[in-house]
Image (spheres, helix red, strand yellow):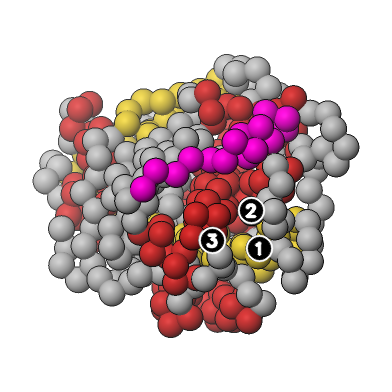
Amino acid sequence: MMAMMARAARLPVMWLLALVLCACGGADGDPAAPIDGGARSGAGTADTSVAIGFVGELSGPFASWGVQTRDGMRMAVADINAAGGVDGRPLELVERDTGGAPGEGVAALEGMVEDGVVAAGGIISSDVALATSRAAEELQIPLFLIKAGAERILTQDSRYTFRTCLPAAPMIIEPLAQYLEQEGITSAAAIVADYEWGQSVRAALEAELGGLESLHIEVAPVPEQDFTTYLRAIAKAEPSVIIASGHPPGTGPITRQSADLGLDVSVVGPNAVWPAIIESVGEAAFGRYADHDCADFASEDYQELATRFVESTDNVFMDDDAIAGYGIVTMVAQAVEDTGGTDRVAIAEYLHASSFDLPGYAFEMAWTPWGELARAQPILSIAEHGAAPEGVTAGLDWYPTPLFQSQPLEPYVPDEGR
């Protein structure tokens, strides 16, 4: 079910049939079977297939996000191929690991263009996205970002770079500000990392939460894992909430170490991977750790996808990165089918003229002319003990409980602020 601004477009009937077959299992070449690793996945050959690229972080501090994204993209490729592909042509996923290095991201994207990839996505790191988005604009290849939210990534001239899950940093604190106001919370503290994303979050915190009675911000290196000194400084300010959104790799240690120091307050994360946080933090996460997501974990379509995802991969939970990865492949396949070819410029134009109601998403996917999320409404959830809906996780005894869904966020305009 995809609603279009310029024209109506829906998942082809055969794709929907394949989703049902996957959910039920059975049939030779079971699309729900685990997908092999490697640089390429999917059916067909380079001469007959439609190639979509995964370019993202499979190693380094952002790997947990990257693996989820890649596995969501693999699942979508398998589903669409099980339904007969796109106009009879199978999809192929070309995979490249940036390792969190901007130069690796640019090289990967250049190589994908040479290999005939029609679009690519999966970037988590803002540093990688900043470099790779510039290459995408020059190469004229659609590039989808997952959790790369630094505001400098997009310019008003961007036409080939699209955010999919995390909006620009100046937008991400607004949902939290809405929630804090609703709850009457007037004091907050934050730890941000000293890199592009962290500094963007710091500016957003100062802009959105500067009116609180108390706002204390600490800056730490990206690799930092011992936050004791920073947390002791924060404790003196007596905050009601600690915001770790600006330090993704340190979120787990911040949550755990704050509890060890007796800071019995909620910790808000950076759209982190839920199982990684729970494994890192343990009991200190429950009733304390909250995070925003672009997925709606309570929806039926999310739970249908998640059930098949945990059955067909090594993951115990389908995070919103995987939902975004699945959505990227779905949108690109639809664009190829509706434009009647693999012209990257035509695909980008189609995406800009369209809006998509994607399975598992918390909001409708649509963009501004420069690729910012136009209708983002993230959901804030908190980690709670209790069995997940049957089959939706691999036997976990916890599940994210929704607290609040934001009002639609005003898209950030590059170079102009709000």
Mark 1 vs mark 3: which is more N-terminal? 1
**Of the residues under marks 1 and 2, which one precedes in the sequence?**
1
Q: Position of residue 126 (x, y in %)?
A: 44, 66
Horizontally, is 344 left or right of 232 in the view?
Answer: right
- Inspect the magenta stretch and tell me whether residue 127 lies in it: no
Q: In the drawing, what numbered circle is on residue 50? A: 1
Q: Nearer the viewer, mark 1 or mark 2?
A: 2
Q: Residue at x 54, y 31 (%)?
A: 302
Q: Which residue is mark 3?
A: 340
Image-based side of 394 in relation to 264, left or right: right
Horizontal and vertical percent for residue 187? Answer: 21, 39
Q: Nearer the viewer, residue 286 or 359?
A: 359
Classify mark 3: helix, strand or loop: loop
Could you tell me residue 108's position as x and y percent? 61, 76
Is residue 64 among the parts visible in the rendering? no
The amino acid beneath tag 3 is: Gly
Vertical comparison of 4 with 149: above or below: above
